[in-house]
Image (cartoon, rainbow, N blue to C red):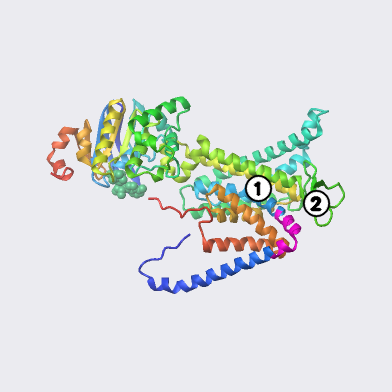
Amino acid sequence: MLLEVHNLNVYYGAIHALQGISFHVEEGEIVTLIGANGAGKSTTLRTISGLLRTRTGYIRYKGRDITNTPAQEIVKMGISHVPEGRKIFAPLTVRENLLMGAYTRNDPNEIQRTMERVFASFPRLKERINQLGGTLSGGEQQMLAMGRGLMSRPTLLLLDEPSMGLSPILVEEIFRIIQEINQQGTSILLVEQNAHMALSIAHRAYVLETGRIVLSGTAKEVAENPMVKAAYLGV
Amino acid sequence: MQTAQAPSTPVIYQQRQPLIWVGRGFFILLGLVVAYILGTNLIKNPTLFAQIFISGLQLGFVYAMIALGYTMVYGIVKLINFAHGDVFMVGAFASYYAVAKYRLHQWPASAFPGINPTLSVLIGSITVILLSMLVCVILAITIERVAYKPLRDAPRISALITAIGVSFFLEFYGALNFVFSPRFIPYERPFEVVAWYIKNGIHLVMPGQQAPENSVTFSNIFLIIIGVSVLIQLFLQYLVRRTKIGIAMRACSYDRQAARLMGIDVDRVISFTFAVGAAFAGAGGVLYAIAYSLIWTQLGILPGLKAFVAAVLGGIGSIPGALVGALIMGQAEAMTMGYISTPMRDAVAFTILIIVLLLRPTGIFGEPEKEKA
Ligand SMILES: Nc1ncnc2c1ncn2[C@@H]1O[C@H](COP(=O)(O)OP(=O)(O)O)[C@@H](O)[C@H]1O
Ligand SMILES: [Mg+2]
């Protein structure tokens, strides 16, 4: 098991956002967490990446306990979190944004090589290399956010709503690239409100409702579940 | 801060319109008066004007060294670090002890007898400045760790009040007899002051003599202050544009959470920012003490506040803004002393603050504060 999450309980002050969440990601998988707005998807990712602390349970990565480890350590271990809303550094250039993604790495030649690989996946970033992050379009910002996330050469990529606010054509493109990244050997934990797209590329899926996992299975099983069809796929 | 006009109160909004114009008219008039005073004096006595300009430059470049620290720290933790002026004071005192008590400026001469005296003074003085910068760095990192870091997630006003507390702490503990003492202390310079005058060319002012009437004089201290201040600016530009830690500083200023997701140790970047600002203030403190040759524990207050005004004037958070704001503040002060009256200088500095806050709260280079979710 690459990532094992067991019985997380996370609070924002008095708000009990995660109420005993458990799931896992195998090496090479795309796993998706789907659920409505406010279900706790982002909170789950933030807890894994060390921005939030859990009161109970544990998170194991490659068999190692990483519960409540500081964010910078998590990145060094090979988990990269592309946050909801992209969170591009607007006053930094595309290049500088990518360099920040490689902050935990030191060899400039290796970093340069990774950057070339990111440009191979996102050729548009290369065209805009000296442009400020804040001047990019929404789709380009999503590409930059993902490219930046890849700069640390993660084993596990956490993607939070990569399709948010994008046109259907761009969504298609982003999801194609997610699959490509996965085929090149990166495992992916994908959080989406766009359940239809997420289920179409994922291997397995979990459904989150108000801080609890209410359903899990292969993407196909979940997509065919009548409740999911009614609530998330609009069928 | 800009106050948003609620759309539901158009009446108030309309009532304020004419007032704004009265205000604008007043400021335009004020600007014209200032321009008139300066213009006529420039024509009447260009030499005097040049002399005043030079002292304004000297002040301005000292303020720039302090203002950078205000603006960098504000940029990253949104804290106006009111203790910064007192770090500047500690820099001056550190160099005082190094020179007057420990003769640190003479170490090259005692370590290598027969060394070229100019070289010895140069190396000795640089050592003194570097040591004082180091003292300020350690002090600032300690202050940050002890007083500000625990309040990182508290409301901003808490940290601001703490900063004022730290400022008083340094001033009043410094004034104890067994610390720096409350007295004015004559400052022994690590090197001699040399002055030149400009009158049909540049001539040395002979020791013990006055520069002739109607000439413009400047000193080696003036040149050193400008040199060091410009060097600091260039270094800082290089730091924030070209180095990893510098880019990380900008990333943290913009979005701390996102920076953490990059694996950036935000606490370390913040400490580093405090350290860099303190190092600059320390260098400024030494040069200020050398220039004015009298020190006491409250010498950081006014330069600190004026550098703060400079940072606001330039646009707090903006590095070029700090320099431009500081140069304007230096000139405003020198011109006030030269053409109005010496005691007016401080009043004018804070008048500028009020005018900036009224007319353009974001300063010259500042952008309206972005609201982040
Ligand atoms: N910073 C926060 N402070 C307080 N409550 C929060 C915060 N962020 C999220 N929440 C609450 O936690 C719950 C889960 O939110 P979130 O993880 O963002 O959901 P999702 O990503 O699935 O939309 C929601 O009830 C939300 O209101
Ligand atoms: Mg979310």
Amino acid type at image mark 2: Lys
Q: Quadrant location of residue B364?
A: bottom right
* Left or right, residue B102 beside residue B36: right
Main secondary structure found in the magenta portion: helix
Task: Tell me: residue A218, above or below residue B257.
Answer: above
Q: Is residue B267 visible?
A: no
Q: What kind of residue is marked 1?
A: Phe
Please tell me which of labels 2 and 1 falls first in the chain: 1
Contact between labelled residues 1 and 2, with CB atoms less than 8 Å apart = no
Q: Position of residue B68 (x, y in %)?
A: 59, 47
Near mark 1 (Cα within 10 A), the count class, few <14, some 14-19 or many ≥20, is many
State how far apart marks 2 and 1 are (Cα). Answer: 36 Å
Determine whether the beta carbon of the residue marked 1 sits less than 8 angstroms from the nearest atom of ligand 1.
Answer: no
Q: Position of residue B116 (x, y in %)?
A: 81, 31
Please tell me whether residue B62 belongs to the stretch shown in magenta. no
Please identify the residue farthest to the right as the structure is shown: B208
Span shown in magenta: B40-53
Q: Quadrant of residue A143?
A: top left
- Residue B179 pos. (x, y %): 71, 47
Give the number of the mark in front: 2 or 1.
Answer: 2
Q: Which residue is the site of mark 2?
A: B199
